[in-house]
Image (cartoon, grey):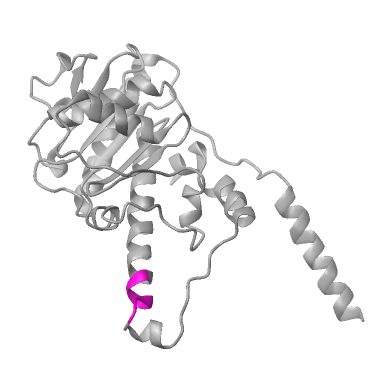
Amino acid sequence: MASSATHIAVSAGLDEKKKAEVKRIHHIPRPESLEAQRQWQLEQMAGAFRMFAKFGYADGASGHISLRDPVQPDTFWINPYGVHFGLLKVSDMVHVDDKGERIGGADLGVNKAGFIIHSSIHAARPDINAACHLHSPYGRAWSTFGRPIDMLNQDSCMFYDDLSVYASFGGVVFAPEEGRKIADALGPRKKNVILQNHGLLTCGETVAEAAAFFVGLERACQTQLLIESVIAPGTVGAVTGLTKTFVSDEEAKYTKAGTGTPEVVHAV
C-alpha cells in the first residue's frame, strides 16, 4: 500500500508540474541603441554563416540569411551572391530596400531568388526580423515528401505547432508571387516551413533564433529519415515489428514551451 501511495503522489506531482507555466530563465540581451542592435545582429549573421559552412550546408551559390534593419525596418540586409559561407564577414553583407536596390553595405550583387523570398516574408510578417534558407542535405531530402516532421522526441517538439509545409514547387524563385506564396504558407505566426522539393526556411526575432531553428529542423529531418528507413517495408525493423512512438499533443506542447521559445532558442 505504501508503495502504491508513493507512486500516486509522484504521478500527481508530475501532473502539477505539467500544468505549471515553464519558468523563464533565459532572456535576449539586446543592446540599447538601434545602431548597436544592427551591429550585434550583423555579427550574429556572419557567425551563423561560418557555422553553416562548418556543418556542410554550403551548396554552391544557394542559400541566404536576411536581417531586417533595426534603424530602417522597411529595409533588410542579405549576404552577397557567390561568396562562400565560410568566408563571409560583417563587411560583406549588403543592405537593400524593398525593391532590391542596394542602399548600403558591401558593393556586391545579391541573389534575386533570395531577395524575392526574404522580402516577401519581411513584408508579410513584421514580427520576423531574420530568416534563413539553405539547401542542407537532410532538409532537402525530407522536403521531397511534402510532409511536416513527426513529434518523435524532445528535440522535434521545438517545432510543435510551429511548422508549415509549402506543398508546391515553381522552380527557382524568380517571380514575386512565388515569394508571396511561401510567406502565405508560414501564416500569421509560425516561424518554420518546409518547402516541398526545395528545402527548409526558418525565421526568428533574431538571427541566432532563426539559425538555431534551422539547425534543429535539419537534425529533426535527419532523425525522421533514419527512423523511416528502419521501418520501411522489407527492412529488418519492419520485419521485427518496430513502430514509431509519437509524443502526445499535451507533452509536445509542454516541451515546446521549454525548448522552442525565442529566448531559449537564442540561447542555444
Q: Residue at x 40, y 52 (%)?
A: 148
Q: Quadrant of residue 195?
A: top left
Q: Residue at x 35, y 40 (%)?
A: 202
Q: 180 above or below 261?
A: above
> For this view, does 3 lie left or right of residue 245?
right
The magenta segment: 228-233
Query: Is 50 in the magenta?
Result: no
Does any portion of residue 127 appear in the rendered image?
Answer: yes
Q: Position of residue 72 (x, y in %)?
A: 32, 11
Q: Quadrant of residue 79?
A: top left
Does any portion of residue 42 appear in the rendered image?
Answer: no
Q: Residue at x 11, y 41 (%)?
A: 84
Between 27 and 122, the one lying in front of the other is 122
Q: Residue at x 24, y 30 (%)?
A: 178
| Image quadrant containing the N terminus | bottom right
Q: Quadrant of residue 73?
A: top left
Q: Position of residue 213 (x, y in %)?
A: 39, 45
Q: 136 above or below 184?
A: below
Between 79 and 127, the one lying in front of the other is 127
Going by the picture, which residue comes out furthest to the right?
1
Q: 12 above or below 161?
A: below
Principal SS element in the magenta part? helix
Q: 119 above or below 33?
A: below
Query: Is 230 in the magenta?
Result: yes
Between 188 and 4, the one lying in front of the other is 188
Q: Position of residue 21 (x, y in %)?
A: 69, 43
Between 146 and 262, the one lying in front of the other is 146
Q: Position of residue 191 (x, y in %)?
A: 42, 37
